[in-house]
């Protein structure tokens, strides 16, 4: 028999590999959102001046990439379930890194649009695959999803921070190159760590299996349909809010925090003349601070989901968004910064709720496909939000957009009121009793 010491050492190694596995999945979520939002800051702070193209017009070249972000989620989830989830994650890390580096060489809007489309295709892999791994492998689903979500939010935040700094010091193209090189490096670490798992998944995928669908009662089926409809409706509407806030925030800050950014830049550089210094970097830092602080809401929501369930928490988060969106019109500088933090707390806080509900309802064998459908809905609407942002911004400015987003949060609040207090669980489906 193996000694207690050997067993203890083996357990420590397994725990260390398990932590590294979760860390790499979190880094993947960080990179996924970073890659998708580098262009938001590039367009807002550099390209519209460098290429002499309007901000709204530049958004048109990012739109196909966001559609790809959504549409390719379903085939990515299907391939992961049929072949290998870990194998798809390796393709994600290495592929998106190469695509980002190639995009940095773009010299025209069309070229950067093609690069963003390929980035979107590969970015579509993460959510159905990474979240399926997280919700299948670990039990404390709410906190795991929330922690993973915080990493994604930090990717959103760092997109503004890194890109703003690069614009001031190295040029916008380096904002695509550096994350690309890092992603490829992480991809090879992931491949080494999960090589045996990929081989095992590939071997098992060749053996035909019949997934047994448990019988459920008619009343339970009605409940499942009701909850699913609410999940997908709130997914669609919350995607409008998420895209409009995360993508447009650097531009909002560029317009509304100029006085604050110029004075902070002058203070940092020891100058008495506002405007002299790294204004783009300061705006990037302010956006990063808002995103990073707001991401804490996800941890709070994650811990509360396991304890109280999604209905009550979702209603509170929706109400927070309504209040702060309605406060935002007309504000500038310090007040605008504080209120932006308020609505971002709500926008980020709602992210883990739908993923938590899907994780409870979907069976493990088809979970990546279900997440794929969820993210097709989410990111297709998310892509459609870019023309909305451009249209509203060109016609009425950001104040009207804030009112529209308050209305969207109101739709979420009304939908969530129809949720049952207890979410159907795939592991405890009641058998048909008729």
Image: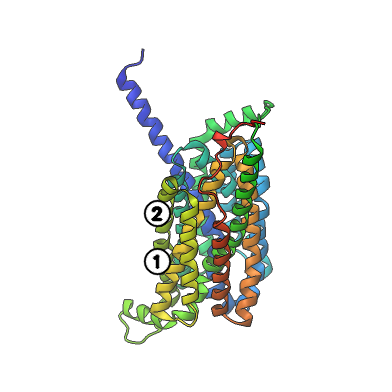
The x and y percentages for residue 185 are 49, 47
Task: Report which quarter residue 407 is drawn in.
Answer: bottom right
Instruction: Return the residue nearer the eye: 188 or 397.
Output: 397
- Label 2 packing within 10 angstroms: few (<14), some (14-19), many (20+): some
Considering only vertical position in the picture, is 263 above or below 228? Answer: below
Give the percent coordinates (x, y) of residue 180.
Answer: 53, 55
**Would you say residue 130 is visible in this rendering?**
no
Q: Is residue 185 left or right of residue 78?
A: left
Which mark, residue 300?
2
Q: Which circle's residue, 2 or 1, is located before the other in the chain? A: 1
| Quadrant including the C terminus | top right
Which residue is farthest front? 434
**Element carrying mark 1:** helix
- Out of 327 and 244, give the one closest to the viewer: 327
Q: Residue at x 41, y 58 (%)?
A: 297
Nearer to the camera, 323 or 350:
323
Query: Which quadrant, please, contains the N terminus?
Result: top left
Q: What coloring was used for the rendering?
A: rainbow
* Residue at 42% across, 40% down: 20
Name the residue nearer the viewer: 143 or 96: 143
Q: Is residue 56 left or right of residue 336?
A: right
From the image, tell me which residue sits under label 1: 289
Query: Looking at the image, can residue 9 be seen?
Result: yes
Instruction: Tell how many labels.
Output: 2
Residue at x 63% of width, y 67% of height? 385
Q: Helix, strand, or loop for circle 2? A: helix
Mark 2 and mark 1: span between their CA atoms? Answer: 18 Å
């Amino acid at each position: 028999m193996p000694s207690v010491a050997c067993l203890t050492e083996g357990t420590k190694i397994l725990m260390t590999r398990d932590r590294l596995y979760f860390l790499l999945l979190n880094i993947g979520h960080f990179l996924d959102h970073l890659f998708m939002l580098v262009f938001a800051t590039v367009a807002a702070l550099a390209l519209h001046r460098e290429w002499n193209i309007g901000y709204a017009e530049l958004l048109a070249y990012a739109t196909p990439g966001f559609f790809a972000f959504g549409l390719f989620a379903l085939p990515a989830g299907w391939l992961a379930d049929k072949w290998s989830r870990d194998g798809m994650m390796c393709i994600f890390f290495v592929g998106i890194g190469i695509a980002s580096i190639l995009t940095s060489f773009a010299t025209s809007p069309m070229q950067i649009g093609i690069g963003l489309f390929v980035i979107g295709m590969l970015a579509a892999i993460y959510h159905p695959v990474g979240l399926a791994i997280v919700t299948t492998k670990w039990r404390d689903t709410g906190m795991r999803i929330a922690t993973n979500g915080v990493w994604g939010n930090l990717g959103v935040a760092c997109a503004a921070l890194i890109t703003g700094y690069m614009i001031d010091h190295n040029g916008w193209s380096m904002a695509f190159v550096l994350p690309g090189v890092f992603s490829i490096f992480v991809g090879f670490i992931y491949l080494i760590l999960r090589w045996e798992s990929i081989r095992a998944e590939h071997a098992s995928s060749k053996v035909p299996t019949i997934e047994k669908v448990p019988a459920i009662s008619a009343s339970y089926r009605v409940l499942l349909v009701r909850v699913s409809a609410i999940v997908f409706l709130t997914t669609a509407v919350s995607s409008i809010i998420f895209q409009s806030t995360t993508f447009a925030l650097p531009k909002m800050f560029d317009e509304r925090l100029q006085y604050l950014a110029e004075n902070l830049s002058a203070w940092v550089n020891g100058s008495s003349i506002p405007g002299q210094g790294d204004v783009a970097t300061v705006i990037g830092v302010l956006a990063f601070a808002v995103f990073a602080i707001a991401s804490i809401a996800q941890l709070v929501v994650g811990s509360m989901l396991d304890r109280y369930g999604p209905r009550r928490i979702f209603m509170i988060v929706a109400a927070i968004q309504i209040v702060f969106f309605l406060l935002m019109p007309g504000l500038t500088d310090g007040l605008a910064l504080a209120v932006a933090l308020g609505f971002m707390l709500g926008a980020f806080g709602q992210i883990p709720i739908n993923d938590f509900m899907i994780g409870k309802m979907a069976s493990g064998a088809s979970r990546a496909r279900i997440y794929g459908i969820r993210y097709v809905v989410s990111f297709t609407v998310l892509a459609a939000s870019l023309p909305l942002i451009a249209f509203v911004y060109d016609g009425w400015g950001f104040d009207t957009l804030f009112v529209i987003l308050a209305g969207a949060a109101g739709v979420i609040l009304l939908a969530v009121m129809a949720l049952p207090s207890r979410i159907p669980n795939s592991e405890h489906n009641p058998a048909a009793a008729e």
